[in-house]
Image (cartoon, helix red, strand yellow):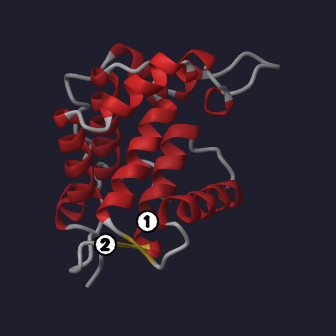
């Protein structure tokens, strides 16, 4: 039997609407046309917002890790999107399936397959610590880091909207080739 969770199989191919709570700052992250960079500028995913690295911002980002709403959103993402094994971990194959979809959703469908594979392999090594399977704590850390990298501020609402929107998009089959 597939590691793909029942919820994902049940919703695959449907086009559920985005959560009504999607934060306006997050909507552009999921619309390549609205977040396209000007020629000569770095694309959004390759840009570094220095204001996110002040001592105050770093402290605020660390506090977000314990935000009950964010913890719940990441738990729901993991439950609905990943095929969690019986021992509560995620295989590299399952991580690759989901993470490949996330890369395509966030970077655009036209990202080369080789780039997707490279990004996923690098992220697996970083997120899993080189292990064969990823436990739930590592999964949380990786998903939090993803939200942390993509959200334009340290607003809990932005992080929640990011994770929830990504959940809906993957459950709808977006980004999956």
Residue 169: % across, % down: 34, 43
In the displayed structure, does residue 133 sit left or right of residue 65? Answer: right
Pick the front one: 169 or 26: 26
* Distance between mark 1 and mark 2 Cα atoms: 10 Å
Pointer 1 or 2: first along the chain = 2
Q: Is residue 32 above or below residue 76?
A: above
Where disc 2 sits, the SS reads loop
Q: Looking at the image, which residue is at 57% across and 23% down?
A: 53
Check disc 1: other Cα within 10 Å, few if <14, some if 14-19, many if 20+: many
Residue 46: % across, % down: 68, 32
From where the camera sits, is residue 152 visible? no
Pick the front one: 62 or 44: 62
Q: Dot 2 corresponds to which residue?
A: 89
Residue 37 is drawn in which quadrant? top right
Q: Select label 1 or label 2 by which is in front.
A: 2
Q: Is residue 10 above or below residue 62?
A: below
Residue 148: % across, % down: 45, 34
Q: Looking at the image, which residue is at 48% across and 42% down?
A: 105
Q: Looking at the image, which residue is at 74% across and 25% down?
A: 42
Q: Dot 1 corresponds to which residue?
A: 95
Q: Looking at the image, which residue is at 27% across and 31% down?
A: 160
Residue 135: % across, % down: 34, 68
């Amino acid at each position: 039997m597939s590691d793909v969770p029942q919820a994902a199989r049940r919703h695959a191919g449907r086009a559920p609407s985005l959560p009504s709570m999607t934060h306006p700052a997050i909507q552009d992250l999921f619309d390549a046309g609205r977040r396209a960079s000007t020629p000569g500028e770095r694309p959004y995913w390759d840009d570094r917002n220095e204001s996110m690295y002040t001592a105050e911002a770093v402290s605020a980002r660390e506090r977000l890790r314990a935000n009950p709403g964010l913890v719940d959103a990441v738990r729901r993402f993991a439950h609905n999107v990943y095929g969690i094994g019986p021992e509560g971990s995620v295989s590299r194959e399952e991580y690759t399936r989901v993470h490949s979809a996330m890369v395509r959703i966030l970077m655009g469908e036209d990202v080369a397959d080789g780039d997707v594979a490279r990004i996923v392999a690098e992220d697996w090594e970083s997120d899993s610590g080189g292990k064969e399977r990823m436990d739930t704590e590592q999964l949380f850390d990786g998903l939090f880091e993803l939200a942390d990298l993509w959200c334009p501020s340290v607003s809990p609402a932005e992080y929640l909207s990011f994770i929830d929107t990504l959940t809906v998009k993957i459950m709808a089959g977006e980004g999956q080739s």
